[in-house]
Image (cartoon, rainbow, N blue to C red):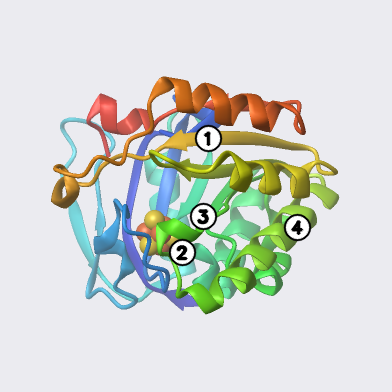
Amino acid sequence: MEKGYITELFSSFQGEGPYAGRRQIFIRFAGCHLSCFYCDTAYARDPKPGFCTVFGSEASSKNRSIENPLPSSLVIDIVKGLKTLDLHSISYTGGEPLLSASFVKEIAKEAKSMHLKNFIETNGYSASAFASIADYFDFASIDIKLRNHRAVAENEYDNLYRNAMDCIKISADKGLETIVKVVVLKNTSVKEIETICSDLADFNVKFVLQPVTVPPHLQHADVVPGVEELFALSETAGRFLQDVMVLPQVHKIMRIR
Ligand code: SF4
C-alpha cells in the first residue's frame, strides 16, 4: 500500500472555474517545485510536512492533526467521513498532486470503485505523470503558466509549456472534462493569450482566464488586470475556443478555505 504526504484534507466549495460553488472534498498533496510569485498555497510547497490537518466539515467537529506519511487506506477513510449529500467530486490538489502520482492513483482508483468522481488540479509539469493517473479521473483542471508568473527559470519555460499542452491533449483524448486555467495579470499580453488559444484550438476544453488574486505580501503591487484588459483577453480567446470564461478565485471572496 502506498503512503504519501498530505498537507490538509477538508470539505469546502470549489473556488475556481466552471465548477465554482460545487461541494468537494479537497486532498491537498504536499510539495510543489514551481515558484509562481502569486502562490496562495506556499505552505503546501513543503514536500514533507510532519502532519496533515483534517478540518472538520461541521461547525461542531474538531480539526485533527495526523502524522505524515498517511497510508492511502486512511485517506479513503477520512474521505468517507467528510462525505456530504451535496458532494460533487474529490479534488486532488496541492501543492502539486502529480509529484505524488502513484499515491494519487491508488486513492483515485479506490474512490472510483466507490462511485465517487475524481477531479485533479495540476500545474501540468509532467505529461508522463499525468498519463499514469488520467484513466482514474473524470475532470482535469490544468494550468498554463505565463512567462511572467516566474514559475520556473526562463530556460525551463518552454519545457513546462510543452508538458502542460501534452497533459491537456492526453486529458481531452481520454474524454476527461478538461479545464484550462490561465492566471492573468495587469499587462498580460494579448499576443501570449492568442498563442496559447491557437495551440488549444483543436481540443475540447473549457478555458478560464483567472484575474490574479494578490497575495498579502504583494498588496502594494499594481498587478490586477482591469475590465477592459479582461474584455480584450476574453475576446481573443473567443476567436479560437468556444467555451471561455473570466472568473476570480471565488473562495477568496467568500473567505473560505
Ligand atoms: S504551481 Fe500552484 S502550488 Fe505551485 S507555486 Fe504555482 S501556484 Fe503555488
Mark 3 vs 4, N-terminal side? 4
- Per the model, the C-alpha gap separating discs 2 and 4 is 18 Å
- Name the amino acid type tagged 3: Leu
- Name the amino acid type tagged 1: Leu
Q: Nearer the viewer, residue 141 or 186?
A: 186
The C terminus is located in which quarter? top left
Q: Nearer the viewer, residue 156 or 32?
A: 156
- Residue corresponding to mark 4: 135
The local secondary structure at tag 3 comes to loop
The N terminus is located in which quarter? bottom right
The local secondary structure at tag 4 comes to helix
- Per the model, the C-alpha gap separating discs 3 and 1 is 12 Å
Question: x%, y% of residue 198?
Answer: 76, 44
For the residues bearing labels 2 and 4, Cβ distance under 8 angstroms: no
Label 3 crowding class (10 Å Cα cut-off): few <14, some 14-19, many 20+? many
- Residue corresponding to mark 1: 209
- Per the model, the C-alpha gap separating discs 3 and 4 is 28 Å
- Residue corresponding to mark 2: 96
- Residue corresponding to mark 3: 146
Q: Nearer the viewer, residue 181 or 177?
A: 181
- Name the amino acid type tagged 4: Asp
Image region (quadrant) for ligand 1: bottom left
